[in-house]
Image: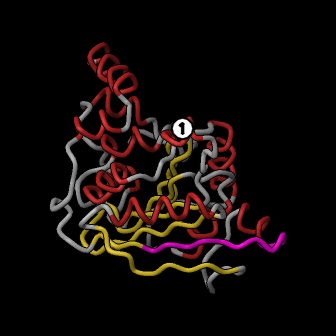
Amino acid sequence: MFCYPESCIVDWKKAIANEGLLTPIDWAAEFGNSQPLVIEIGTGNGMWLQTYARTHPDCNIIGVEWAGEYVRDVSKRCLRDGIQNVRLICGDARLLLPFVFGENLLNAAHIYFPDPWFKKRHKRRRVLNKWFFRMLIRKLAPESEIFIATDDADYYSYIVGEARAVAAMETVSTDVRHYSADGVPQTKYERKWRTMGREIYYLQLKNALNSQDDAISTEEYVMRQGLQYAYEMLVNKCSSEA
């Protein structure tokens, strides 16, 4: 197992350095069971993740968040509250996705209120684009679903267009409303926007075809996402610690 002592945080860099860059983490060994795997990309303060983990004890939840302070705080709260079906990864989800998850592994993905990067020159930093979706379907089991929410109308239209550019991605539902669906945990931002009366845009997608039908190679993905430098750093780390 690659958890720090008394922590939910997975040392993914150590894992790939020890096992090899293209060897995904053994999540069954990490959790100690083979329960279905669910990923939340962008856990933030962990409100959604912790609620979901409590209400879905038959699933293992992996939270990905780039802000180390958030990751450490969520880990402490999960340990304090005895939540055992959560693991956390600190890093850029765009870079992590190809390397720490095996093929056809994930049973669902949740992505709530990703940063829309409003400025034109920053939009290339958006997590959700067709290249990310094409990599994500490699990691999703067939018929697995992706749940997305945003309060930004422009980003929502962009996400819908990018998802529809991926042949293997089927749109299950689109919805705009002022309220949260019954039984679905709310994020910090959803509560904030709802109190302000803002509209929330929801999108549900499904990996409807065999995940290889519109998959993307790791090499092309890294190039399309502009992750060459970060990828080279990972390669060098693995080589130096091998």
Question: Which residue is more in the foreground, 200 or 191?
Answer: 200
For the point 42% across and 68% down, which residue is it? 146
Can I make out residue 35 in this image? no
Q: Residue 14: within the magenta?
A: no
Secondary element at tag 1: loop
For the point 56% across and 58% down, which residue is it? 155
Q: Within 10 Å of the Cα at label 1, are there few (<14), some (14-19), or many (20+) other Cα atoms?
A: few
Instruction: Answer above or below: position of 161 versus 117.
Output: below
- Residue with the mark numbered 1: 5
Q: Which residues are magenta?
A: 194-204
Horizontally, residue 231 falls left or right of residue 76, namely left
Horizontally, residue 157 falls left or right of residue 140, namely right
Can I make out residue 32 in this image? yes
For the point 60% across and 50% down, which residue is it? 116
- Of the 4 image quadrants, the one containing the N terminus is top left
**Residue kind at label 1, given as amino acid type:** Pro
For the point 29% across and 56% down, which residue is it? 139
Horizontally, residue 35 falls left or right of residue 54, namely left
The percent coordinates of residue 167 (x first, y second) are 24, 66
Question: Which residue is more in the foreground, 177 or 1?
Answer: 177
Question: Which residue is more in the foreground, 167 or 230?
Answer: 167
The percent coordinates of residue 114 (x first, y second) are 58, 53
The percent coordinates of residue 40 (x first, y second) are 50, 58
